[in-house]
């Protein structure tokens, strides 16, 4: 496959880039975190979406190296900002099948000097179903060092509420599909409300993803979500634009 061949060279050719999308704490109105979202600047195709190349990377056995690059880049970037924002990095379920994952996280923290409490790992519910025990042990280990864990795309998978009890996590990210048009969609609104209440009872924060309008912001705030992320606040930004937004002089 052509894309796979190019992907093998993309790391050494430095073709990957991280964009950062801000996350706002509703109560304080402050930006408290950013999510790192990878982009591939392909020499001929231009920007290739991760939705297109991450699955190829997973199949080709390249996701470990790309994931390692993203963790290092995100920690180095965040360590250089004067605002102590938390940085969230997406982790493929395949990365949690490999025993070296804990070491990869630790070396990213050590080489950057970033405090572990400023790193968040975003994992999806599917991790809970496959490769359960190893993934669980590794997540527990990094979490005991202060790294936080977010459950991404919550509500779209198949995990039972029962999994949540034994799983160590700090945040639920409510999938955009429940948030879009939430104010005009009683079922979406009811689900967002239910997940926000689940967050309260589990003592974890709840981020509504994909908030694009003030109406959606009001709806998810009224439903009890604690944080928002989405185009209403900001699209994913290059580092310079992010620093400008948060007023960071560095
Ligand atoms: O930013 P965008 O909407 O194009 O992202 C599309 C998908 O790619 C999302 O599901 C997102 O979680 C995933 N993604 C973005 N960056 C990374 C990354 O660094 N690693 C992994 N595994 N997935 C990522
Ligand atoms: O799967 P994950 O939640 O990591 O993916 C986040 C994806 O959602 C990224 O591709 C990001 O670019 C995209 N995204 C972020 N905010 C919005 C938004 O407000 N609307 C839409 N349509 N997509 C968004
Ligand atoms: Mn994510
Ligand atoms: Na998500």
Image (cartoon, rainbow, N blue to C red):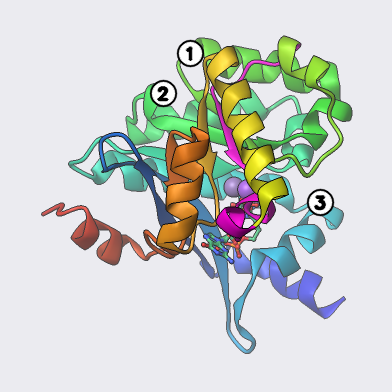
Would you name the residue on which mark 3 appears?
61
**Image quadrant where residue 196 sits:** top right
Circle 2: element type: helix
Residue range in magenta is 166-184
Q: Residue furthest bottom?
A: 44
Q: Earlier in the sequence, mark 2 or mark 3?
A: 3
Mark 1 Cβ inside 8 Å of ligand 1: no
Would you name the residue on which mark 2 appears?
116
Q: Earlier in the sequence, mark 1 or mark 3?
A: 3
Q: Residue at x 58, y 14 (%)?
A: 201
| Classed neighbour count for the residue bearing mark 1: other residues with Cα under 10 Å, few (<14), some (14–19), many (≥20) | few
The reply to whether the magenta stretch includes residue 169 is yes
Q: Is residue 122 above or below residue 100?
A: below
Work out whether residue 150 can be spotted. no
Find out whether the residues at labels 1 and 2 contact each other: C-beta distance under 8 Å.
yes
Circle 1: element type: loop
**Number of labelled discs?**
3
Would you name the residue on which mark 1 appears?
145
């Amino acid at each position: 496959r052509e894309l796979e061949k190019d992907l093998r060279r993309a790391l050494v050719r430095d073709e990957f880039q991280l964009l950062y999308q801000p996350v706002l704490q509703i109560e304080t109105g402050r930006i408290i975190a950013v999510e790192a979202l990878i982009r591939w600047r392909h020499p001929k195709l231009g920007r290739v979406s991760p939705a297109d190349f991450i699955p190829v990377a997973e199949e080709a056995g390249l996701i470990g190296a790309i994931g390692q690059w993203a963790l290092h880049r995100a920690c180095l970037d965040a360590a250089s900002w004067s605002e102590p924002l938390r940085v969230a990095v997406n982790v493929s379920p395949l990365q949690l099948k490999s025993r070296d994952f804990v070491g990869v996280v630790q070396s990213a923290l050590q080489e950057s000097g970033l405090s572990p409490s400023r790193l968040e790992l975003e994992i999806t519910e599917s991790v809970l179903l496959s490769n359960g025990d190893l993934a669980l042990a590794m997540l527990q280990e990094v979490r005991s060092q202060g790294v936080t864990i977010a459950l991404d795309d919550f509500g779209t998978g198949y995990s039972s509420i029962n999994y949540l009890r034994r799983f160590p996590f700090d945040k639920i990210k409510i999938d955009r599909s429940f948030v879009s048009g939430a104010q005009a969609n009683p079922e979406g609104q009811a689900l967002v409300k239910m997940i926000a209440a689940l967050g309260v009872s589990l003592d974890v924060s709840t981020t509504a993803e994909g908030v694009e309008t003030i109406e959606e912001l009001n709806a998810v705030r009224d439903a009890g979500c604690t944080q928002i992320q989405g185009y209403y606040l900001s699209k994913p930004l290059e580092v310079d634009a992010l620093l400008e937004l948060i007023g960071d002089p560095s």
